[in-house]
Image (cartoon, rainbow, N blue to C red):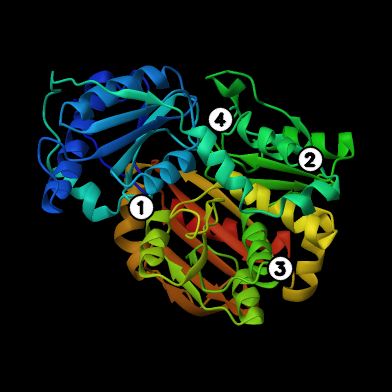
Amino acid sequence: MADIHFGTDGWRAIIGEDFTDENLVRVVDAAACIFKEDAVAAGRPAEAPGTLLIGHDCRKDAHAYAQLAAQVAAAHGFNVKLTQDYCPTPTLCWSVAQDAEAVGGIMLTSSHNPAEYLGVKLRMADGGAAGKEFTDRVEAVLPDAATDARGAYEEVDLMTSYLAALKKLVDADAIRNAHLRVVVDPLYGAGRKHLAGLLRDLGVEVCEINNAEDPTFDGLHPEPIPPWVDRCIAKVPELGFDAGFINDGDADRIGAVDEHGNFVNPHRIITLLVSHLAEDKGLHGRVVSTITASAMLTRQCKRLGLELTSTPVGFKWIYAEMEKGDVMLGGEESGGIGIPSHVMERDGLLMALLLAETMAQRGMSLGQLVDDMFEKVGKLEFERRGLTITEDQMANFRANIVPTYAPDEICGKKVVDVDRRDGVKFYLEGDAWVMMRPSGTEPLVRIYAEAETVDEVRALLDAAEAVVTK
């Protein structure tokens, strides 16, 4: 039996290795125990503790695994509703939040990980990500052996109501009258057909790529960053379209491409959408982002008079801030952006619609929107790398570098502040920064840097890589 642990957002493993029927049963059995424990503590009867919703993405055999998960959860007395077909994670989250009887949700997905992975995300009654306290309790009751107990479940349509709700959140007339043309790239993931259909319903001309039923993802990693988005980057200018929207494997993240084929990274999307929500839609509240956020977002919030709250990496930390209230938008560097008035979770489909709405209402292409944003807050470049390192290097990194490494300057730039909440981040003069942190889901260290030029960014990354790998 595998040694199972929940990382930044869920448990993930390679299908047929650690992700097996037996291990899935163990995880769902333990999760159902904790969901039931909390339901009973809240006054629900043990024999009928409420509803659990179960969804899955487009991974190999995902529906069959989800059926097994539904049977195991149902054996605990839950009324289990299983998606009829693949669905985005935000669909499951929104559906849980809308169901008064739902005490939580279980999503079978491996998000942006390569095709050979599958995993389990746990969601609370409001649709938000299960926090560490909850997943620690799940780990504590993981059985050594898989239970044989099974129950009956119901298969339901989760998509129709969710998609209808999304369309109500944007200015349909403005989008329709703008005659936009966009490329949609679901990267073979759970957003396929759904985002393209939404945009077409709103009068947008759509070319959807990478949308076949292919559990190998044609060799792509379903993560909306280069190089995996290169097909979209090529397609938008080839067709002369206005923009490209890219979702990850479970469609809770977004990346974008402008009309010239320039990748618009999540830093720029978040900074742009904060302006759209505040200035075009008249919304207000705190902006919450992770420690890897761009200094452009800090500048944007200052310009608009919005409070910015910083958290460790992982949307569960943003969710914890959303629970406190008064949050307009929460977003992370990896492309997960959420609006709590919709659901307390990321939603890559909604963010694509909001970008289309911004283009329509402002009468600007995506590239023009980004250029206008640069004029107002300045332009910064960003890159990140994933470093696969040895166990000895990781031990040294965790024991020595994260807690004690304290240079006065990096690449000739003075260190003006240090944050060690999640790895270590060095704030440098001129709003540049460099950060090193261990991944919560993979055996690697991620390094991040932002500065005014790409050359400066890469020099900072090289310096960080030398520190991590020594």
Q: How far apart are marks 4 and 3 (CA)?
A: 31 Å
For mark 3, give the secondary structure: helix
Q: Residue 202: x and y, percent?
A: 74, 42
For mark 4, give the secondary structure: loop
Is 140 situated above or below 314? Answer: above
Q: How far apart are marks 2 and 3 (CA)?
A: 21 Å
Which residue: 56% across, 74% down? 284
- Location of mark 3 (residue): 280
- Location of mark 4 (residue): 189
Is residue 466 in sight in this rendering?
yes
Give me the disc on residue 203.
2
Q: Distance between the residues labelled 1 and 3?
A: 27 Å
Q: How far apart are marks 4 and 2 (CA)?
A: 23 Å
Of 457 and 147, the residue lying toward us: 147
As drawn, is 50 to the left or to the right of 370?
left
Which residue: 40% across, 47% down? 98
